[in-house]
Structures are given as structure tokens and as C-alpha cells.
Image (spheres, rainbow, N blue to C red):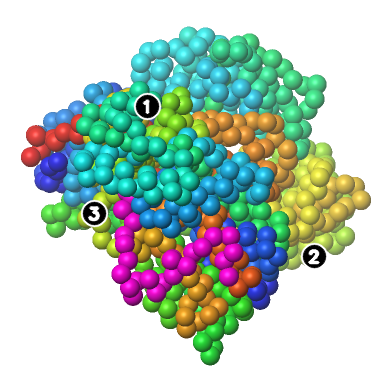
């Protein structure tokens, strides 16, 4: 077996990040091979028929597929760059990087000097009864079928999730002629941009907040879906079940980075919730802990196409410097500066927090989130945050305050103001507020914050118990320990939880683990939530032990669907924050490969 | 962190040997035992092995020990309380050379003397009974129907959970860091989570047996070698026996779930603790195996990994008590066949600790001092 020795850069994944990185390297004369599993490069860009937001210097207001065309065209113009579609890098071994030709079922082995992993992300999966029926799709698959191959996955669709992807794909389904029956959303707010939401509303698609899918109906394929309203305890309210006659259920509940190759190659990975899950550690040059391995785009943290392209270019330029000693420092600095600016706004606060955890530098541009102006002057003091921004006739906060620190004023419709110098932190207002809009807050000395959440559900958590801390949209922010529970005669109890200060501003609710149905977590091996729970109770408290005991992630998907969900269950059951759990081993190959394909490995003669 | 700072027995290693020793200690009335596992249960050699349970060995002592283990495996579910996917589908050893035929003839004769249900098959007999194998080049085969295989993870979990029910403590993510001796006896083990005083220490550290011996100042003649293995997607059940060819350097079995699991040895391996799998291995195996099992050609590989064979000089286990430190026991150097011997070894070591001598099986030939004299090497190793 001979190996290809003179390849400078192997780029894994031809999305915006991979294409941009490949381009920077190709422009500097490096030999570049870009490998992508799809029939054409462009990644998710190909599927985006909407116009992009962002920075005008980076294709803003150009449609996604047109961006892909431009990048592809430029890369193809270089003689020193080559694109291999329908190929997959299946492992990064110390003695070679095997690439499978997925069409011919053969492999070749490469020995690149540098690797840029731009493998993107995979979709998060949702657990409900019959979720393995044909007709249940991820939003990405629907986009691929519909926008890339011109195949409509179905005629009547139920969309699960009202984030930007859910909203955009719903819009696109309508454009393509399908009927989106409803968008359902478990939390109480629409997740995506208002403009996207307005777009689908204009098309007459109802957005059902605080609804969940409890099961899919059908024997051989989806014939319908049962949706129920959720009560304040996140449980379906009996009697609110509603059946939708649909042939397609589309799941759009978020993405997690596809780090399999990075992890298997030995990159140090860490669980960073704000970046979508496990990500490889990397510096601001996008270099991982394995010096010759770089990452860019969603694999380094879920964000969007503009930042993916910038990250790809930064990685590409750094690789050029590594291999040639030449570096366009001006360009590199400009890219880093652009990236910092892009991320300085309010909608990037999660990304900023995630990157800070990676040790990266980010800046926040000044914007005001709250009306309290002197809230920050009383750091370390237990005090309320009043999130009452809508004028309504209501003033129990004012009337209940024993020291007269809260003022609504003569007009009961006014928004309350608070004088923190007089506040004693008694928290009565928080238990009195009918809108549950007052939260107690204190920054602790150890980098955590205590948040008192008005909580009117049963069962009440107890001191020391671990719960999920939820954000304003009901999204899980982190695992949190219950510091204390202050019971109140009016049954608006205050549950104080401890969370890291950097996420505290986003935490506004808790999720107390409760019973789920007999739903499947690992589809390959058909392992249910209850089986996992029971195993944890029986003493299997490590992902690898659970894997070996229940066969979780031993199937063809290698854990893409079930690893993170299993870890979340493990975290909830054991109280160990998910970021402290061992994520388990990532074993090659990253996708099933036939004996034939491996045994008939060829060599890439054109690179010899 | 540690619940107690004193245990009668400390077992180092949460693989199948360590948990079996703990199980049999508790069964023999000593449950004041802690098992220390630096990672998670079955994370070392046990959880990486092929899972075969074979009695066809070239050395008489190995045959006896394995036969004793099979007695235990047969009643495992009632004795330990767990379905470990034990399946007596036999072992089929293929002979490709005249030398192998002679060796198999000699071995089966010796094994039959030990009352093992082994038979020597002609090529035709083998072909008609195992039609899924391409028998080109085969001259004869040895077949023992009471050999078989089981799931090594479940076996380890079974021993650990049963031992816990009897009062044994299993501490995962807890490593032994130092063994403290006073006047020629071990008095305590320093762990990553605190110090544990103890009367007896058992070295069941598998791939790290040499290093654990050194903690007590005992030089053990074991070293570890990487062995690679991989598993395919599941297929309908077609393969009862575990099939081995020493000449062609492979073993293969089908698991209860239907996956095929297979591996080979590599003579060029250097001793060490490297368990990173290589492309070379996968390439060689995928090229080789379909020649013998043509149906594999279109089957897909799911996962590929490596584990350590903890080799002794004669490829047979070392089960002994240290001469200079008489409360230090070791069950080590299993040379790639520790899983299948675990029940008999666990039982013997526990009896030795509790009753002063192994009662159920004679293990005197497995003492460390055998290497000072002449010794014969176990040949039936892949």
C-alpha cells in the first residue's frame, strides 16, 4: 500500500467553512483536496433559498445557494485544488487518512500535512412514540430532498420547533407546494427571528406555543400526529390532544457539532452547551489540540454561515503560514476583527459565552437588556430583577414591598421601577407578582450566581437536587443545583438555584426531571429512556458502562443520534453536570464501510 | 470521597478477573472488599476482548482451568444472576499444514484424556458441517462442541453487581497510585481518592499488572502488547462456533446480537500500552477474511479498537502470592485468554485468600517460580 505524501491540505467537508478554508490555501499555491459526502459541495448553503443577513463584505443579501456557486466556481479555477464529492473521510489514523469512495465502495489512503475539519453539524433528535416511522424527518433532510434534489418529502407537514430553521423550512415547504399544518413549539415563545416568524404567520401557518408531539400515528409510515398542550410542568394536559392528519413530521430542534473525526483523531473535546454540545478545543487561529488539525464552521460550535466562512479563511491562512512561513497578517487580523464585531451583538451572547469558555476573546457591544439602570451597582446583594416591560394594570410588587423600594406610581399601568439602595432582598415581591416576572438574583464570590425562580409546579425540587436551568425560551441552559426552596403561603414558591454567572442572565426557569413515555433513545439498538434510567439506578453511571450494558450507540449510526441524549439522561439522573461527564469513546470508522471498500483501497495516482 | 478508609481486601482492577475475585471472596464469606478501577468497569482488556471461551489448549493446565471455568459458565445465570449471552456453539480450529495436523492430533489426544468432548474432523467432515467456510487448503480441523463464547462486559457487570449485593464496594474512576509496605507486608493502598488500609491486596490489573507489581516493589515478568479487533454490522445467525486458524492468524465469532467480531495477532508489535487502532490492521483483515468467509465481502465494518494482551513468558497466566510480601496476590499475565479463565481463577484466588489454599482447582503450575526452571510455551494463541 502506497500513500500520498505530497498533499498539503485535506479539507473534510465542503460547506461554507471548508470551501473558504480551501480557497485561502489554494490562493497561496498549496495543494488542496476537499472531500465531501454530498453529490455537490456547498454544504447547507445549497439548500438555502433565502437571503442572508450579516455583513455585506461576506455575501449578505445573497441567497445561500448562490454563495455556494461562487465559492465552488472559484475553488474549481485553481489547478492545485481538487474537489472529491460523494467521498467520506472515515477515520484519522496515525498511519493514514482513509477516504471512501461512496459510489464505487473503494478507499484510498492519504497522508496530508494538514487537515481542516469542516464537518458541520448533525441535527438533534426528539423522543416521542413511533419516532422511527418513515415520514419522520430532520429539517436538514427535508431541505436536502426539497431544495437540493427537488423532491417533496410529503404533502402535509407538521413542523416541530419554531427556531429559525423550523421557521425557514416551513416557509420553504409552503413555497414548494406542501401544506404546513402547524408549527408547534414546546416553550412559550417563538425561537426564531421575528421577521421569519412574521413570514410564516403571513402564510397562515399557526404557531402553537407550549405544545408537544406525543406520538406519530401510522403502521408503515406516518399517517398523522398527536399533539397536546403542555401544562406549566411540561406535561401534556389530558384532554388537549389534537390529531393532525399529516404524512410528514419535520423535526427542527437544533444542531450539534459533528465532532466524531476530531474526537477520534485525539483532539481534546469539551461540552459547551452554548456551542451546541461537544466541541474540539481550539485557539483563535482555529487550531485544535492536535497541531496539524484545524476546525472551522459548525463543527467548532453551532453558529451560522457567515462566521463559518470567516473561520474557514482564518484556518486556511494559518495553515498557509504553517507550511510556507508566509502570512498575510493584515488579512488575518482583518478577519479576526470582523468576526469579533459580528459576534458583539445581543443575538450572539450564547456564542460569546461559549467562546469565552474555550479561552477565546470576545467583545460585547453596549446594548441594554433591562430597564434597571443601577442593578449592576449592587453586585453581590440579593435583589430582584423585574422583567415587566409591558404596561398592564398591576401593582402588587409596589404594595407588597415592606420598605417602599418599588414604585409603579399613580397610574397602575406604569412599568415598575426599583430603588436598589432601599431594597432589603426580602423577596416578597417575587412571590407576589402575578406575572411571575420578578426573579431574585445574587452574584456569589465563587463565580456562580444564585437565582430565585418563582415556581408554582409540583413536585417542588428539594435542596441539593439537580434540575435543568431553562432560559427565556424554555431551552436548557445548564444543570443547576437547588440551593434552597422558599415556600410561600400563596404557593408561589421560590426555588433558588446556583448557576455559573456567565449564563445567569439567561436563566429564567427550571425543569424538574419527570417521567417520560416509553420512548426510544437509541434507534439502532432500540434502547428506551426507561431502560437507561433503570440501568443508571442499577449502578451504570458512566456512558461507556451504559453503552456496554445496553448496547447504546453500538449500531450503524455510531452514537450520532443517542450519545448526547443518553448523557443528558445520565446527567439528570445522577446530578452530575453534563459538562463533567465523560463523553465516551469515539471509535473508527465514523461510518459503516464494507470489507470490499477497505480491502480494495487504491492510491490516488494523480497526487503521486 | 471514599466511604471507608479500611477494607480487609483491596482488589486492583475492575476487569473480569478483579470482579470475579471479589465475587468469590464474598461468596466465601469475605465481603469487606473494595475493587479499585481507574476508569470504568471492563474498560481495559476485558471490555476489548473477543469473548471466546475455549478449552482446547496445548498445555494440560490451561485445559483443566478452562474446563473448570466452563462448569461455572454453564451455571452462571443461576450462580451470579445475569444472562451473559453464554453460548456453547463450539470452537473450530482449522489445520492448514502437516505440522498443524500433527499438533492437533497430539493435543486432542491429551484433551480427550482430560475428558474434553473434542474431536478431530477430516476436511470433508468439516466442510459438510460448516458450509459457510471456504475450506480451500484445510487439511483437518479440531472441534469441541462445549467451547463457546459470552459477552465480556456483561460478565464483568454480573460479577460486580453480585459482589455489591453481598457487601463488596466497587469504586470506579479510582486508581491505585501507591502500595505502602511495612516490614515486608502491605499495610495500605494510596488511591486517587484517599488512602485505604488493608490486609490483603490482589493485583488483577490486566495490561498494567507489571506497573502495579512495581508499586509493591515486586518485579513481575509480564508485558503488554496491542491486539486489534473489529466488529461488523449484525447479520442473521449463521455461525455457531468460534473459528480459529493459527496458520492464517485469525479468529472470528458471531455475537448474540448477530455482529461478527474478529481479530488477528501482529508479530511486529512492541510492548507498551498503545491501544490506538491502525489502518494497516483493518486493511489486512478485510483483505484476508472474505477468502475464508466469502459472505463478509459486502458486510460493513462498524467499530474498530484495540486492547492489551498481558503476556507472560510462556503465554500462560501467573497466579501466585509474592514470596517477599505474603499478603500480595496476583492473577496476571493471561496472555489474551483471561476472560475465559476468570471464573476458575477468581474462585481459586478467593479460596487461597480465605482458606489459605486454592481448593477447587490445582493452580500450582501457574506460580511465578516456574520461570526459573524449564517451561513450555502455550502454542494455541492468536
User: Which residue shows up at 54% across the image and 60% down it?
Assistant: B361
Asked if residue A547 lies left or right of residue B91, the reply is right
User: Which residue shows up at 77% across the image and 58% down it?
Assistant: A463
Residue at the disc numbered 3: B267
Image position of A401 with respect to A511: above or below: below
Q: Tag 3's secondary structure?
A: loop
Residue at the disc numbered 1: B130
Residue span colored magenta: B357-382
Q: Tag 2's secondary structure?
A: loop
User: Which residue shows up at 45% across the image and 31% down it?
Assistant: B240
Q: Tag 1's secondary structure?
A: loop
Q: Nearer the viewer, residue B343 or B269?
A: B343
Mark 1 → mark 3, Cα distance in angstroms = 29 Å
First reached walking from the N terminus: tag 1 or tag 3 = 1
Q: Which percent across, then down, holds residue A274?
A: 51, 48
Mark 2 → mark 3, Cα distance in angstroms = 76 Å
Residue at the disc numbered 2: A424
Asked if residue A368 lies left or right of residue A450, the reply is left
Q: Label 1 is found on which chain of the structure?
A: B
Q: Which percent across, then down, holds residue B14?
A: 53, 60
User: What is the quadrant of residue A151 in the picture?
Assistant: top left
User: Which residue shows up at 43% across the image and 58% down it?
Assistant: B61
Q: Label 2 is found on which chain of the structure?
A: A
Q: Nearer the viewer, residue A90 or B98?
A: B98
User: Is there any visible trace of residue A568 in the rendered image?
Assistant: no
- Decide: few, some or many residues near mark 2? Use Cα within 10 Å; few <14, some 14-19, many ≥20: some
Asked if badge 2 and badge 3 are on a common chain, one would say no
User: What is the quadrant of residue A362 in the picture?
Assistant: bottom left
Quarter occupied by the C terminus of chain A: top left
Amino acid at each position: 500500500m502506497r500513500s500520498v505524501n505530497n498533499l498539503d491540505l485535506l479539507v473534510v467537508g465542503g460547506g461554507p467553512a471548508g470551501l473558504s478554508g480551501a480557497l485561502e490555501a489554494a490562493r497561496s499555491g498549496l495543494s488542496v483536496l476537499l472531500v465531501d459526502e454530498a453529490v455537490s459541495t456547498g454544504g447547507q448553503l445549497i439548500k438555502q433559498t433565502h437571503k442572508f443577513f450579516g455583513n455585506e463584505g461576506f455575501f449578505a443579501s445573497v441567497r445561500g445557494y448562490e454563495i455556494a456557486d461562487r465559492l465552488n466556481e472559484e475553488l474549481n479555477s485553481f489547478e492545485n485544488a481538487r474537489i472529491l464529492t460523494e467521498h467520506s473521510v472515515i477515520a484519522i489514523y496515525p498511519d493514514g487518512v482513509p477516504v471512501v469512495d461512496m459510489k464505487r465502495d473503494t478507499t484510498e489512503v492519504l497522508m496530508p500535512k494538514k487537515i481542516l475539519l469542516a464537518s458541520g453539524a448533525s441535527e438533534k433528535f426528539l423522543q416521542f412514540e413511533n419516532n422511527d416511522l418513515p415520514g419522520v424527518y430532520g429539517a436538514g433532510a427535508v431541505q436536502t430532498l426539497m431544495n437540493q434534489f427537488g423532491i417533496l418529502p410529503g404533502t402535509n407537514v407538521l413542523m416541530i420547533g419554531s427556531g429559525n430553521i423550523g421557521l425557514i423550512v416551513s416557509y420553504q415547504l409552503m413555497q414548494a407546494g406542501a401544506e404546513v399544518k402547524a408549527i408547534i413549539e414546546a416553550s412559550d415563545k417563538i425561537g426564531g427571528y421575528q421577521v421569519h416568524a412574521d413570514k410564516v404567520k403571513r402564510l397562515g401557518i399557526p404557531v402553537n406555543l407550549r405544545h408537544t408531539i406525543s406520538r406519530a400515528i401510522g403502521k408503515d409510515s406516518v399517517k398523522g400526529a398527536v399533539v397536546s398542550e403542555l401544562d406549566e410542568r411540561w406535561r401534556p394536559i389530558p384532554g388537549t390532544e389534537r390529531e393532525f392528519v399529516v404524512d410528514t413530521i419535520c423535526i427542527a430542534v437544533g444542531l450539534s457539532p459533528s465532532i466524531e473525526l476530531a474526537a477520534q483523531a485525539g483532539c481534546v473535546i469539551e461540552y459547551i452547551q452554548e456551542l451546541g454540545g461537544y466541541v474540539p478545543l481550539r485557539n483563535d487561529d482555529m487550531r485544535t489540540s492536535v497541531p496539524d488539525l484545524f476546525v472551522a464552521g459548525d463543527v467548532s460550535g453551532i453558529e451560522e454561515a457567515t462566521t463559518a466562512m470567516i473561520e474557514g479563511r482564518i484556518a486556511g491562512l494559518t495553515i498557509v503560514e504553517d507550511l510556507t512561513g508566509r502570512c498575510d497578517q493584515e488579512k488575518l487580523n482583518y478577519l479576526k476583527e470582523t468576526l469579533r464585531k459580528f459576534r458583539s451583538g445581543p443575538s450572539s451572547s450564547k456564542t460569546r459565552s461559549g467562546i469565552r469558555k474555550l479561552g477565546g476573546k470576545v467583545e460585547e457591544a453596549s446594548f441594554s437588556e433591562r430597564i434597571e439602570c443601577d442593578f449592576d451597582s449592587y453586585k453581590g446583594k440579593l435583589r430582584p430583577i423585574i422583567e415587566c416591560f409591558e404596561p398592564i394594570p398591576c401593582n402588587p410588587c409596589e404594595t407588597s414591598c415592606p420598605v417602599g423600594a418599588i414604585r409603579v406610581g399613580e397610574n397602575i399601568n406604569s412599568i415598575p421601577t426599583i430603588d436598589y439602595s432601599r431594597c432589603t432582598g426580602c423577596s416578597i415581591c417575587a412571590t407576589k407578582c402575578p406575572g411571575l416576572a420578578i426573579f431574585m438574583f445574587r452574584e456569589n464570590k465563587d463565580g456562580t450566581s444564585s437565582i430565585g425562580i418563582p415556581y408554582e409546579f409540583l413536585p417542588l425540587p428539594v435542596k441539593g437536587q439537580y434540575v435543568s436551568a431553562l432560559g427565556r425560551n424554555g431551552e436548557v441552559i445548564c444543570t443547576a443545583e437547588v440551593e434552597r426552596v422558599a415556600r410561600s403561603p400563596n404557593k408561589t414558591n421560590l426555588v433558588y438555584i446556583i448557576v455559573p454567572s456567565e449564563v445567569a442572565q439567561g436563566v429564567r426557569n427550571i425543569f424538574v426531571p419527570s417521567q417520560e413515555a416509553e420512548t426510544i433513545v437509541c434507534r439502532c439498538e432500540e434502547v428506551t429512556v426507561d431502560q437507561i434510567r433503570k440501568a443508571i439506578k442499577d449502578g451504570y453511571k458512566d456512558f461507556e458502562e451504559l453503552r456496554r450494558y445496553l448496547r447504546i450507540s453500538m449500531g450503524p449510526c455510531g452514537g450520532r443520534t443517542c450519545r448526547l441524549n443518553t448523557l443528558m439522561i445520565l446527567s439528570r439522573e445522577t446530578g452530575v453536570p453534563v459538562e463533567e461527564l465523560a463523553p465516551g469513546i469515539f471509535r473508527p470508522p465514523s461510518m459503516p464501510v464494507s470489507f470490499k471498500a477497505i480491502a480494495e483501497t487504491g492510491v490516488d495516482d494523480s497526487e503521486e | 470521597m471514599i466511604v471507608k478508609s479500611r477494607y480487609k481486601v483491596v482488589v486492583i482492577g475492575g476487569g473480569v478477573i478483579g470482579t470475579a475475585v471479589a465475587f468469590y471472596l464474598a461468596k466465601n464469606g469475605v465481603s469487606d472488599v473494595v475493587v479499585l478501577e481507574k476508569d470504568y468497569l471492563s474498560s481495559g482488556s476485558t471490555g476489548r476482548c473477543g469473548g471466546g471461551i475455549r478449552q482446547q489448549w496445548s498445555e494440560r493446565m490451561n485445559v483443566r482451568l478452562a474446563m473448570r471455568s466452563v462448569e461455572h459458565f454453564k451455571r452462571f445465570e443461576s450462580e451470579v444472576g445475569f444472562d451473559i449471552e453464554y453460548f456453547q456453539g463450539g470452537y473450530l480450529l482449522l489445520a492448514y499444514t502437516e505440522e498443524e495436523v500433527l499438533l492437533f492430533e497430539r493435543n486432542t489426544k491429551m484433551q480427550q484424556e482430560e475428558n474434553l468432548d473434542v474431536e478431530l474432523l477430516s476436511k470433508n467432515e468439516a466442510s459438510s458441517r460448516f458450509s459457510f467456510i471456504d475450506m480451500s487448503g484445510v487439511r483437518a480441523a479440531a472441534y469441541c462442541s462445549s467451547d463457546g463464547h459470552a459477552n465480556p462486559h456483561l460478565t464483568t457487570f454480573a460479577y460486580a453487581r453480585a459482589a455489591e449485593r453481598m457487601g463488596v464496594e466497587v469504586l470506579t474512576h479510582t486508581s491505585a497510585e501507591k502500595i505502602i509496605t511495612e516490614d515486608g507486608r502491605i499495610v495500605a493502598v494510596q488511591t486517587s481518592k484517599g488512602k485505604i488500609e488493608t490486609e490483603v491486596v490482589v493485583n488483577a490489573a490486566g495490561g498494567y499488572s507489571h506497573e502495579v507489581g512495581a508499586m509493591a516493589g515486586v518485579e513481575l515478568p509480564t508485558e503488554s502488547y496491542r491486539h486489534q479487533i473489529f466488529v461488523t454490522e449484525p447479520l442473521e445467525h449463521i455461525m455457531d462456533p468460534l473459528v480459529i486458524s493459527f496458520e492464517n492468524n485469525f479468529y472470528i465469532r458471531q455475537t448474540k446480537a448477530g455482529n461478527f467480531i474478529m481479530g488477528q495477532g501482529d508479530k511486529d508489535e512492541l510492548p507498551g500500552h498503545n491501544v490506538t487502532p491502525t489502518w494497516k490492521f483493518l486493511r489486512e483483515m478485510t483483505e484476508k477474511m472474505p477468502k475464508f468467509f466469502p459472505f463478509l465481502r459486502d458486510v460493513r465494518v462498524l467499530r474498530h479498537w484495540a486492547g492489551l494482551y498481558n503476556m507472560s513468558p510462556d503465554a500462560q497466566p501467573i497466579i501466585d502470592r509474592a514470596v517477599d510480601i505474603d499478603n500480595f496476590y496476583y492473577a496476571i499475565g493471561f496472555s489474551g485468554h483471561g476472560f475465559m479463565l476468570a471464573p476458575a481463577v477468581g474462585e481459586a484466588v478467593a479460596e487461597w485468600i480465605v482458606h489459605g489454599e486454592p481448593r477447587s482447582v490445582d493452580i500450582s503450575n501457574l506460580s511465578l517460580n516456574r520461570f526459573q526452571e524449564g517451561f513450555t510455551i502455550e502454542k494455541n494463541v492468536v
